[in-house]
Amino acid sequence: MMTHPAGVFSAALTPLNADLSPDHASFLTHCRYLLDEGCTGIAMLGTTGEANSFSAKERMALLDAVVKGGIAPDRLLPGTGVAAFSETVELTRHALSVGVTTVVMLPPFYYKGVSDDGVFAAYSEILQRVADDRLRVVLYHIPQFSAVPISHDVIARLLAAYPGTITGIKDSAGELSNMIAMVERFPGFSVLAGADPLLLPLLRAGGAGCITATSNLVARDLAFIAAHYAAPDRVAELDAAQARVVAARNRVSKFAQIPSIKALTAERTGQPGWRRMRPPLLALNAEELAALSLR
Amino acid sequence: MMTHPAGVFSAALTPLNADLSPDHASFLTHCRYLLDEGCTGIAMLGTTGEANSFSAKERMALLDAVVKGGIAPDRLLPGTGVAAFSETVELTRHALSVGVTTVVMLPPFYYKGVSDDGVFAAYSEILQRVADDRLRVVLYHIPQFSAVPISHDVIARLLAAYPGTITGIKDSAGELSNMIAMVERFPGFSVLAGADPLLLPLLRAGGAGCITATSNLVARDLAFIAAHYAAPDRVAELDAAQARVVAARNRVSKFAQIPSIKALTAERTGQPGWRRMRPPLLALNAEELAALSLR
């Protein structure tokens, strides 16, 4: 069983049916593809997976389908943090009930200007209510969406109060310096980069890996980097893999990132349905699609 | 039946039991108090009501309890807008199922930097799925929390696409000029101030009323203002009422607003349980409580 997550975790896209419900079968196929490409695990139902555009019921049904479909629960890190702590408790308990022990947990994200005491109180309330020793939590720092940053002081307090439960953080703010500061301050705590190009420098600085969006496209390169980042005889291959990762990231950053990654997945699989998005996010338009596919 | 909301709507606080579940009985008492004080209706489960800290189940149970408790459904404007549009559909259908026809609807608020097209698509998807001619929607512009502003262009598109359904907006951004611009651009559309001191100037400029937090404390004064704002012989009384509204607003703005209003409600009712907050919001500490109660 995973205690402290390490490696390449894909912030998996969520394919949609024509009625915008999650397409369970295509998602299962995508999970198998990501694992075959070398991902350590699947961080399903995160920001890239449009998780917060799904109801609790839809989220639980998708996780059920994946586990029933044969993906080992210890390869799954579902997102369970929503605006209402009571629903976070429900989603987290549900994950545990199907054998998943590590979850990625956003802080409650509706109220803004929340104090460190408030963030600590929210996580504390959730962990005390879930009350399950099996639980392992990866905190989720993505202030550009949550608007509720997770400070180092909050991490220190949570690690002191819930040792063994708080095992890592996904840092999607994009600043390598913040990730390295956490690696240095919190020994044994898994710092996971939320941006693909930062996997290599973070691993070299003692980080644990990544949970990233571009992994939906270049998981094989990321897995190569994670396996060989410290190998003195693989420098040229590492440079080439890193260059492909950076190129993929740049490519999908030209237009809105999640729809772009979906569009390229539609291209790879030959299934245009992959392009569908849940509002408020929108699929790329024809012009953007054409520009994206020109390399 | 309310078509276009006008008057004073209280953004009602939600009292909590010791386990932080909504205290249905105290909430019902509070709703009766607000109506007795002269509120036109109760905008329950809004930002002030900590709505986004409750699960869909908890929200529906609270609305059920209030309707079962005898509050007329046409006096209720529950908030139904959450991050996931599918859950907004569920909450809105539930409101209709208990006889409530007007809801206050936040746009999906997790994803940021959403385009006008995305905001329009989200509301559109919701309205087409609810597909109920009885429905009346008050849009909710509160960018300091939602981070998804509702532009005038989005309003114009929604009014054109869903005439009769889109009936108003709660503008909590605090700029009177934006409210007046909407009054001028959209005749017949109810513009409701989200800040108590702006009720009087907004009514004088053709606005419809307010949905506000301080109304939990000074509903009587707000109702007086709404009834007599245009009466030339009531100027002194209006000035006095407005001064009390402004004083109340200033008083609760010294510390965090929602816990302050809850603390003063605890004082009024003699029930200290009213102070409880759901994390990430926190109750005032002893020092803040003492400072708040000194007038």
Image (spheres, coloured by chain):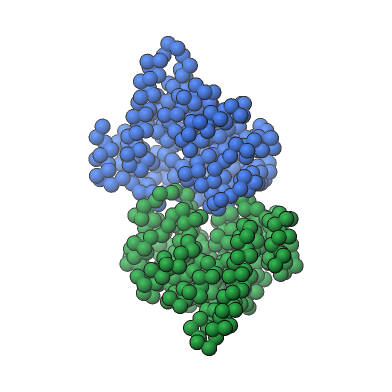
Chain colours: A green, B blue
- The reply to whether residue A8 is visible in this rendering is yes
Q: What residue sits 52% from the left and 33% below the top?
A: B178
Quick check: A248 above or below B176? below
Residue A262 place in picture, x, y as percent: 66, 62
Quick check: B205 above or below A240? above
Which one is nearer the viewer's eye here, A215 or B2? A215
Q: What residue sits 68% from the left and 43% below the top?
A: B128
Q: Which image quadrant: the C terminus of chain A?
A: bottom right
Which one is nearer the viewer's eye here, A171 or B218? A171
Q: Quadrant of residue A255?
A: bottom right
Query: Number of marks in the image?
Result: 0
Q: What residue sits 54% from the left and 70% below the top?
A: A197
- The reply to whether residue A57 is visible in this rendering is no
Quick check: A151 above or below A42? above
Residue B256 place in picture, x, y as percent: 35, 43
In the displayed image of the protein, which residue is found farthest to the top? B233
Q: What residue sits 61% from the left and 74% below the top?
A: A244
In the displayed image of the protein, which residue is found farthest to the bottom? A233
